[in-house]
Amino acid sequence: MSEVTREWLLERGACVWDVDVFQRLFGGAAAPVSLEALERARAAGINVLWLGLQMATPEILGGFIAFTVEQRRELLASHGLGQVAPADWRKRAERMHREWEDNGDHGTRNIAAGLREMARDADIEATPARAERAARAAGRLAALTDGEKAVEDAQVAWLSEKLEVRS
C-alpha cells in the first residue's frame, strides 16, 4: 500500500476525530505511507497504531500480538514475575486477584489483569481489533512504571518495519 485516503479510513471505520484530523493535515489529497507522514499524523494525535494494524496482513497481526505479549513479559519481569510460564498465566492471575481482594493493593490487581490479558492474547485469532486490544493491554501494564510512551513507540517502530514503511 502506498497511500492512505479519507475514503480508505472511512471504509475501515476510522473514528470521526481521526478522519477530521487527517483531512486537515493532508487536505483532500492522499497521504503517502511514509515515515514522515506517519510522524506528522502521530504528532497531530491520529491513532497510527490503529492505522497500521488496518494495513497489516494476518501474519503481521499475529506477530504483532506476540510482540506485545513479549513486551508485557519484560514488564512483568520488572515486578519479579519474569519466570511465570505461559501455561501458568491464568492461574497466577487468579491468585493475584484474590491477593488484591485481601489487601486492596491496586498494583497487584493491575498485574493480575496484565497476566490474564496475556493469556487471552496468546490464544486468539489475529484481527486488527484484537491486535489493537493487545497493544492497549501492554500500554496499561507499562503505565505502572510510567513506560507507556516507550511501549507505544516500540510498537509503532515494530509495525512500521514489518509494513516496510520508508522515508
Image: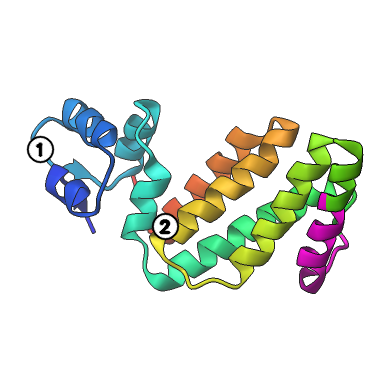
Q: Residue at x 89, y 48 (%)?
A: 99
| Along the line of sight, the residue nearer the viewer: 60 or 33 | 60
Task: State how far apart marks 1 and 2 are (Cα).
Answer: 27 Å
**Residue 129: assigned label:** 2
**Mark 1 surroundings: few (<14), some (14-19) or many (≥20) residues within 10 A:** few
On the rendered structure, is 164 left or right of 112?
A: left
Magenta stretch prevailing secondary structure: helix
Residue at 87% in and 57% down: 95
x 62%, y 48%: residue: 138
User: Is 76 drawn above or below residue 140 in the view shown?
Assistant: below
Left or right of residue 155, residue 100 in this image: right
How crowded is the residue under tag 2: few (<14 C-alpha within 10 Å), some, or many (20+)? few
Q: Hey, what amino acid is under mark 1?
A: Ala
Is 91 contained in the magenta span? yes
Q: Residue at x 60, y 49 (%)?
A: 137
**Camera sees residue 24:** yes
Outermost residue to the front: 102
Residue 150 on image: x %, y %: 62, 37
Along the polypeptide, which appears first: circle 1 or circle 2?
Answer: 1
- Tell me, yes or no, if residue 165 can be seen here: no
Q: Quadrant of the C terminus?
A: top left
> What SS does tag 2 mark?
helix
- Residue span colored magenta: 83-97
In percent of width and height, residue 21 lies at 24, 28
Q: Name the residue beneath numbered marker 1.
A: 29
Q: Quadrant of the N terminus?
A: bottom left
- 117 or 102: which is nearer to us? 102
Residue 80 image position (x, y, % from top left)? 90, 49
